[in-house]
Image (tube, rainbow, N blue to C red):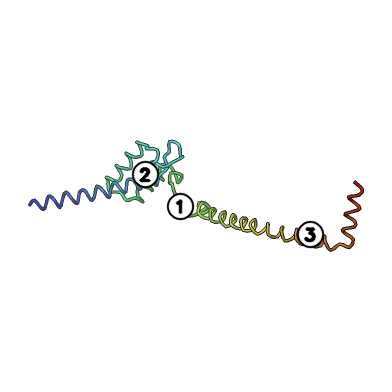
Amino acid sequence: MKHFWIIIFVSLLAAAQENEELIIDLEQSLMAPCCWSGTVFDHGNKELETKIRLLVADGETKQEVLDHFVQVYGERILAIPVAQGFNIMAWIAPVIIAIAALTVLGLYLRTPRKIIEKSQTAHQEESSIPYNEQIEKELQDLD
C-alpha cells in the first residue's frame, strides 16, 4: 500500500512539472497585451498568467490555449507569427536581407583591388609618355 502512494505522488509531481513547462512555453509564445512590446513571460502580466494557468489546469493543449487567445486578441497576440499569407514575409525578409547584405559586402571587398590595379595601370601609362621628364622639368621651371 505504501508503494501505491509513492507512485501516485511521483506521477502527480511529474504531471505538475509538465504543466509548469507548458505554462512557461505558453507565456513565452504570447505577447503581453498591456504594451505589445514583449511576451507575457517577460512582462509578468498577472491577468494573462492566471488565465493561462486556468486553461492548462482544465486540460487544454498548447494549441487550444493559443487559439483561445487568438480569438480574444487576434493574431498579434502570438509572439511568433504564423507562416502563411502576408506573415510569410516575416520569415522570408530576413533571408533576403542577409543575402543582399552579403552581396553588397562581397562587392565592397572586391572594389578596392580594382581601384588599386587601375591606379597602377594609369601610373605605368603616365611614365610611358614621350618627353614626360622634360615636360615636368619645364613645368617646375615656370613656378
Disc with the residue nearer the chain's start (2 vs 3): 2
Name the residue type under label 3: His
Q: Which residue is drawn at 37% across and 37% down?
A: 45
The numbered dot on residue 9 is none
Q: Which of 15 and 114 is in front in this view?
A: 114
132 left or right, relative to 26: right
Note whether 124 is above or below 74 in the view shown.
Answer: below
Task: Choose top left, top right, bottom left or bottom right for residue 35.
Answer: top left
**Mark 3 or mark 1, which is nearer to you?**
3
The number of callouts visible is: 3
Q: Which residue is drawn at 84% across and 63% down?
A: 128
Task: Choose top left, top right, bottom left or bottom right for residue 123.
Answer: bottom right
Q: How far apart are marks 3 and 1 (CA)?
A: 60 Å
Note whether 36 is above or below 134 in the view shown.
Answer: above
Q: Distance between the residues labelled 2 and 1?
A: 17 Å
Name the residue type under label 1: Val
**Mark 2 or mark 3, which is nearer to you?**
3
The numbered dot on residue 123 is 3
Residue indicated by mark 2: 27
The numbered dot on residue 82 is 1
Q: Residue at x 36, y 44 (%)?
A: 27
Place of residue 76 in the rendered image (x, y in percent of width and height, measured from the top left): 46, 44
Place of residue 47 in the rendered image (x, y in percent of width and height, measured from the top left): 35, 36
Name the residue type under label 2: Glu
Q: Nearer the viewer, residue 1 or 100?
A: 100
> Which secondary structure lies at badge 2?
helix
Are the two marked residues, 3 and 1, in contact with CB atoms closer than 8 angstroms? Answer: no
> Which secondary structure lies at badge 1?
loop
Place of residue 127 in the rendered image (x, y in percent of width and height, measured from the top left): 82, 61
Disc with the residue nearer the chain's start (3 vs 1): 1
32 left or right, relative to 101: left
